[in-house]
Image: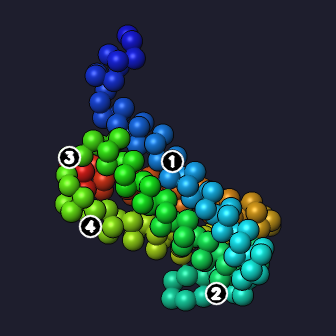
Amino acid sequence: MNYKQWIEDHPAIWEFIKFNVLSNISTVTRIVCSTAGAALFVNVLGLTTPFRFLIFNYTSDGSNGIGGFITFLIAEVLAQVVNYFVQMKWVFKSEHGYGESAWKYAVLAVFIVVVNLMLPGYVTNFCQDAFGAGPALASNIASVVNTLLAVVVSFPILKFWIAE
């Protein structure tokens, strides 16, 4: 069986594969922005004051305080913007206009961004306290957890609600 025939025989699996592979474009965006943001906000500007507000907890040394929060906020917003265009046009090939789908994606993105802003502080603290992980490893684990959660939540919502 050749490649094209396999895709025709398994369109749902192929769509999920494309979703995951092309999601890496937003993951790369997130990593680049996180690296640049940490360099600017934490290393250069020294914005490491512990930060806690409502559900957001950036109070441990490894969470990088307010600089870590700002970094995750910028990285997540930019990653979600990139992901919207990639998923709608390349994966789901949605013909909906931006007015029909953008607001729905914005709802999903806000949920993902809030979770992705909230979760790293807790995951980082847990990794450091429970496993003795260093700040860099704990931060990377938090990024992996965020990415996996985003896939589990966003694929069905994109497929069945936003791109329909």
**Residue type, mark 2 in image:** Phe
Placement of the N terminus among the 4 image quadrants? top left
CA–CA distance in space, label 3 to label 1: 21 Å
| Residue at horizontal 36 percent and vertical 32 percent from the top | 14
User: Marks 2 and 3: in contact by CB < 8 Å?
Assistant: no
* 90 displayed left or right of 62: left
Element class at badge 4 = helix
Answer few, some or many: residues within 10 Å of disc 2's Cα (few below 14, many 20 plus, some between 14 and 19).
some
In this picture, is 111 found above or below 29?
Answer: below
CA–CA distance in space, label 1 to label 2: 30 Å
| Residue at horizontal 30 percent and vertical 56 percent from the top | 157
Write down the residue under mark 1. Answer: 25
**Residue type, mark 1 in image:** Ile
| Residue at horizontal 29 percent and vertical 30 percent from the top | 11
Element class at badge 1 = helix
Write down the residue under mark 3. Answer: 95
* Residue 126 is at least partly visible in this image: no
User: Marks 4 and 2: in contact by CB < 8 Å?
Assistant: no
Answer few, some or many: residues within 10 Å of disc 4's Cα (few below 14, many 20 plus, some between 14 and 19).
few
Write down the residue under mark 4. Answer: 103
User: Marks 1 and 4: in contact by CB < 8 Å?
Assistant: no
Image spot of residue 69 (x, y percent)? 60, 77
* 4 displayed left or right of 162: right
Identify the mark at residue 81; answer none if there is no mark: none
| Occupied quadrant, residue 40 | bottom right
**Residue type, mark 3 in image:** Glu
* 141 displayed left or right of 26: right
User: Marks 3 and 4: in contact by CB < 8 Å?
Assistant: no
